Amino acid sequence: MERRTGTTSRGIRCPIIREGDDLAEIVTRSVLEAADCEGFEIRDRDVVAITESVVARAQGNYCTVSDIAEDTASKFGRGTIGVIFPILSRNRFAVCLRGIAEGADKVVLQFSYPSDEVGNELVPIEMLDEAGIDSYRDVLTLKRFRELFGDIRHPFTGMDYIGYYQDTVKEAGAECEVILANDPRAVLEYTKKVINCDIHTRKRTKRRLLNAGAEMVCSLDELMNSSVNGSGYNEQYGLLGSNKADENRVKLFPRDASALVYDIQKRINAATGKSIEVMIYGDGAFKDPVGKIWELADPVVSPFYTSGLEGTPNELKLKYLADNDFADLSGDALKAAISEKIREKDSNLKGQMVSEGTTPRHLTDLIGSLCDLTSGSGDKGTPVILVQGYFDNYTN
């Protein structure tokens, strides 16, 4: 019988993962038990994806506020530190900020506006227009911002992030001054020592600061990039990709997990005879049309994956073929013509009209986004996702 489904994405329920757990065994067992219980089969080129959170938890990859403070002080020598372009997130940044503030005497906190890097809004852009503010050029003090816009709260969380971050710094024992500017060099009027907290633009920001005369610049990936007093760390991403564990600790992005994905691949192959792919995923890469939040607060969607997930899709646009090449066909004749076209397609369709409108993104970014939407971030209890049929096409 002809298969009537294409890609499916299943959340796989797992036990609560704790530090030191054998994650390869737990993931393998959970996937196989789900298949047995729900009556589906594991197939070649299925994708098993594990959220980065449980990988880091199993690794015990945590650090404390004190660890962050010690690392900050050792690199900057206390004094006045500029902290620029933080994202507006209690989960992602508040604990990190407290650690940075404990390692400084004064923090000059520079917010981008009207929103942070991932789209969290400080002030509606329409209000900037009405006030005659040019966000590309104007540097606003906190007093001026409040005079113009008042106490504006985040539409989803109800938080006043400027006030919340300011209080966080003060409670950590440091003095705090707030400015709002989109040019990173604005902070150099206050201090020549800067931590730039942007994620995807961090290399350019650091370069611009150094070229403008900054004495010391660290991006977040350069804090906690080595162990402090036996703490966790991430040599590649530092504090980027971290999440609040409790009021005094953050869970860092996972590290050294290449062996894990290949171990799970090998175990499932031994149990089923099927050749699957495995990846670890964090935030998906998509934008909320209402809140305008771009989800990707992690440095990458997938830090570790098996080799079969390299590359980008190589797909034909079916509606283009139906409306152009085979506009005079319908029914079985159209189906046969398109199927034959797919079987004969070039191994690299880049630049060809027949692929126009397909998604030229990395496979791990596409599949990781699907997995993030499937697992969610709440109480579903499905930190493992099984994606089936992703590499199928109309002929399968």
Image: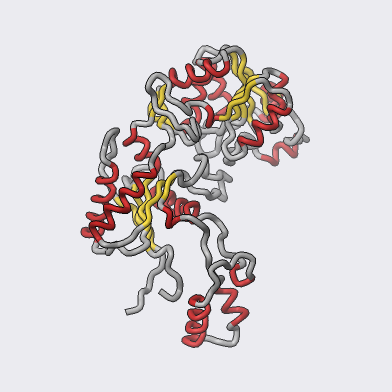
Determine if residue 247 is in view.
no
The percent coordinates of residue 63 (x first, y second) are 41, 25
Quadrant in which residue 257 is drawn: top left
The front one of 309 and 178 is 309
The percent coordinates of residue 236 (x first, y second) are 49, 35
The colour scheme used here is secondary structure
The percent coordinates of residue 344 (x first, y second) are 52, 77
- Image height check: is 25 above or below 96? below
Residue under the image location 60 percent in, 12 percent down: 79
Tell me if 284 is positioned left or right of 351 in this view: left
The quadrant of the image that shows the N terminus is bottom left
- Image height check: is 170 above or below 289? above
Residue under the image location 56 percent in, 29 percent down: 161
Tell me if 101 is positioned left or right of 143 in this view: left
The front one of 101 and 349 is 349
Residue under the image location 52 percent in, 59 percent down: 312
- Image height check: is 49 above or below 354? above
Residue under the image location 67 percent in, 32 percent down: 207
Tell me if 288 is positioned left or right of 303 in this view: right
The front one of 129 and 329 is 329
